[in-house]
Amino acid sequence: MYPVNYSVGVVLNFDTGFGKMGMSCIDMALLDWYASHPNYNTRLLLHQRNSPSDVVLSAAAALDLIKNVEVQAIVGPASSMQANFMINLGDKAHVPIISFSATSPSLTSIRSPYFFRAAQNDSSQVKVISDIIQAFGWRQVVPMYVDNEFGEGVIPYLSDALQEIDVRIPYRSVISPTATDDQIEAELYKLVTMQTRVFIVHMLPSLGSRIFEKAKEIGMMDKGYVWIVTNGISNVFGSFNSSFVTENMQGVLGLKTHVPNKKKLEAFRVRWKKKFRQDNPTAINVNLDVFGLWAYDAAKALAIAVEKVGSTKTFTYQKMNVSGSSNDLERFGVSLIGPQLVQELLGTSFRGLSGDFSLVNGQLPSSTFEIVNVIGTGENVVGFWTPENGLVRNLHSTKSISRSSASNASLGSIIWPGDTSSAPKGWQIPTNGKKLKILVPLKDGYNEFVNVTYDTSTNKTKVIGGYCLEVFEAVRKALPYDISYEFYAYAKPDGETAGSYNDLVNQVFLGNYDAAVGDITIRANRSLYVDFTLPYTESGVSMIVPIEDNKSKNAWVFLEPLTWDLWLTTGCFFIFIGFVVWVLEHRINEDFRGPISYQVGTSFWFAFSTMVFAHRERVVSNLARFVVVIWCVVVLILTQSYTASLTSMLTVQQLQPTVSDVNFLLKNGDNVGYQEGSFVYGILRQLGFRDEKLQTYNSTEDLHRLFQIGSTNGGISAAFDETPYFKVFPKDSPLARDVSRAILNVNEGGQAKKIEDRWFNRHSSCPDPNSKVSSNSLSLESFWGLFLIAGVASVLALLIFGGTFLYEHKDMLICSDSEDSSWKKLCDILKQYDLKDQKSHTFRREDQSQIGAESVSVEQSPQSTPPTDHGQSPRETEPQQSGEIEPAIELAQGPRGNQ
């Protein structure tokens, strides 16, 4: 049984290398497939129709295939423009249209179930582009695209992707497919005059090559430019002449569909090149690319789907009942197997030459892209993009690239236009001699910020200088590039201000000026229309009020350094320490013995004299010395802290605002002031201040006068004023970010402070409330650790002493009469404690001194005794002398402690 032939049309431009490459891949796909599947019952019979780039001719070719040949499917056309009308024909005849190169997203909007895109939708590239833009921190891009369905189809998707990352498209460069060289050159010169230097090129290679050739001629391939091309050009880099690439496309970044590099693909590439040269010996510079691989896989998928439909089906068309006056578009029939063939195509999937092949929703799903950099005569892969991980350095990495700045992008080394490895900043001031027009506000007062005067001799308003302008000049010098500018005063011809600050901001928004410099405050409504740089001073609205000296002048100020709980704790510890020292010293130190009143007085005197370190009593116990040393440290810290706090209270100026709450002003009905022309008026009205309670001022002198008068006499109790910011730019201006970075450099280098000190007198009579020295009373919370240490040491000393004492006199507790009460035992112990400890070294030293003195007296007495009146000899008197000395010695050696 012979295989059944299915008629399939092929509509391509066979006069071009692209059409010839596609046709050769289709032929090879069918030859390879049927050679490996000889048992198939179906065969695809190809009917070729040459279709030039003209849309009408391609439609006519498709119409001929459907009406006259009754094909069951059509492979082609090559371009998105041709596919648009052909899809409608296929939908009407139920004939699947399979294109391997019509990539415009707009074709999807036709919503025909009979259109299959065996290629990637161009919209799959926009996420790759936005990730690259975000990785390098570029804020503005200009898309350049061809003015047809291929170019326009991707723009809405690209705009949405860039909008998600807050990247602006200031201009769209639309190039006609039939544009002359002069027209291309004129469009490129228009781009040169703009600030944006990042261009995304989406067009076919024939027009793209002319763009880059002209860009090279006028200097747009030099340092500072960024060129990114979509896969419409990148996928066919191999068809470009190598000398053309070397001369005109150096540094270009491109998105290229990634094809797994397998041995099977390389073997096919060799076979294809051999066959293509045999079939097309006159064709030159034609190389196999991903579109050829998609053509190969599309033909294979169609062969598989047709086999699934089977050979028993009727391959004819069903004729439609039409009137005699109908045209050719109404006379052709409907394919009977079209719906089933559509279902089989949707269910076909395999591993093809281009990778995994499956038609999800009628098209190939988004897959991996290569990021290539044109260097020399070829291209270098610097990274990849996958739907799962975004930008990655290699396909084995699962870590996506940081998108915070270009320095964090882990792409490979990139050579940018101008043969530089430094990533361009993406914009620059045009070099056509244009100066930035910078608007400066006109102020009646506070010329320290911006000094703008009206010269009556010339009838012109001049910008003289000021703090804001000097900071701007310092920031300009800190920029990594030079900018030329000119100041314009926001004034009428007669020297009066031309409007409010909101009007000034609106002038920048309308594009009449490039920027504005001055004491301009960021507000929510203003930030909707313009961009502000980082501030160089604090932000917001401030309330200015008089201050009063709150220095303590009462007679009891000496008590204020310490809180009552700290005073109480300190006093209690003085008494406690005196008691502890008395307990430890009473039995061994004569200074702590005597009458009860004397002992109490000595204990108090000793404890409190440590406050000034004037105690004279000896401390002989080691435990007492340990306690006293620790207590002296505590006292030293307390006295020093008390002295410092009292000194602060008596000498430091204590400044307090007369008003600290806006509600207090509203409740009392006080007058408040604001600078004339300021937006603060609206805020005060929102807070509830009536117009009759609002006073305006134009200078510091006016403000001082209003404060001197006071609210009751037509003055004010408080003033509200805005805090100045630095610079205003048009919305999404790339210059705003560079200036903000330069402001940070100026601030960190200390230059901003020097400028501020020059313009604003730091010795003014209005002190900074933030510089107030805190002198609050010292509390127990700050010293409880010291008291804890002293208390623990004292208790520990008492425990050691008590334990030792009880151990030495344990016989009094054990051997006493069992009938004695506990109270009597306690009294006996206390009586024993009250006695001197004769074993102490202090008393032993005294006894030894006394005995030594008496011994010397005894030895000298015989020699000094005068002769008796009765003539007795000295020997006769010795017994009497001995009897007199013996009791003295006996007394000294008698029982101790019974004084």
Image (cartoon, rainbow, N blue to C red):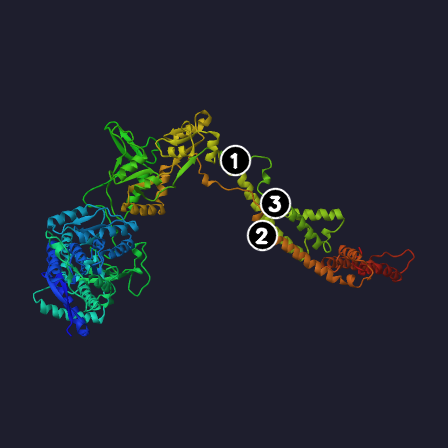
Give amino acid for label 2: Gly
For label 3, the SS is helix
Relative image position of residue 101 (x, y in whole percent): 18, 59
**Residue 728's image quarter?**
top left
Which callout, 1 or 3, points to the residue nearer the camera?
A: 3
| Mark earlier in primary sequence (3, 2) | 3
Q: Quadrant of the N terminus?
A: bottom left
Q: Between residue 844 and residue 217, name the one nearer to us.
A: 217
Residue 785, labelled with which disc? 2
Mark 1, other Cα within 10 Å: few <14 / some 14–19 / many ≥20: few
| Mark earlier in primary sequence (1, 3) | 1
Mark 3, other Cα within 10 Å: few <14 / some 14–19 / many ≥20: few
In the rendered image, is residue 522 in sight?
Answer: no
Q: Report the residue marked by disc 1.
A: 550
Residue 565, labelled with which disc? 3
For label 2, the SS is helix
Relative image position of residue 554 (x, y in whole percent): 58, 35
In the rendered image, is residue 607 in sight?
Answer: yes
**Residue 328's image quarter?**
bottom left
Q: How many marks?
A: 3
Give amino acid for label 1: Asn
Q: Quadrant of the C terminus?
A: bottom right
State left or right for residue 608 relative to residue 50.
right
| Mark earlier in primary sequence (2, 1) | 1
Relative image position of residue 799 (x, y in whole percent): 68, 58
Give amino acid for label 3: Asp
Q: Between residue 685 and residue 303, name the one nearer to us.
A: 303
Q: Marks 3 and 2, how far apart in space?
A: 15 Å
- State whether residue 352 is above or below residue 137: below
Q: Marks 1 and 3, how far apart in space?
A: 24 Å
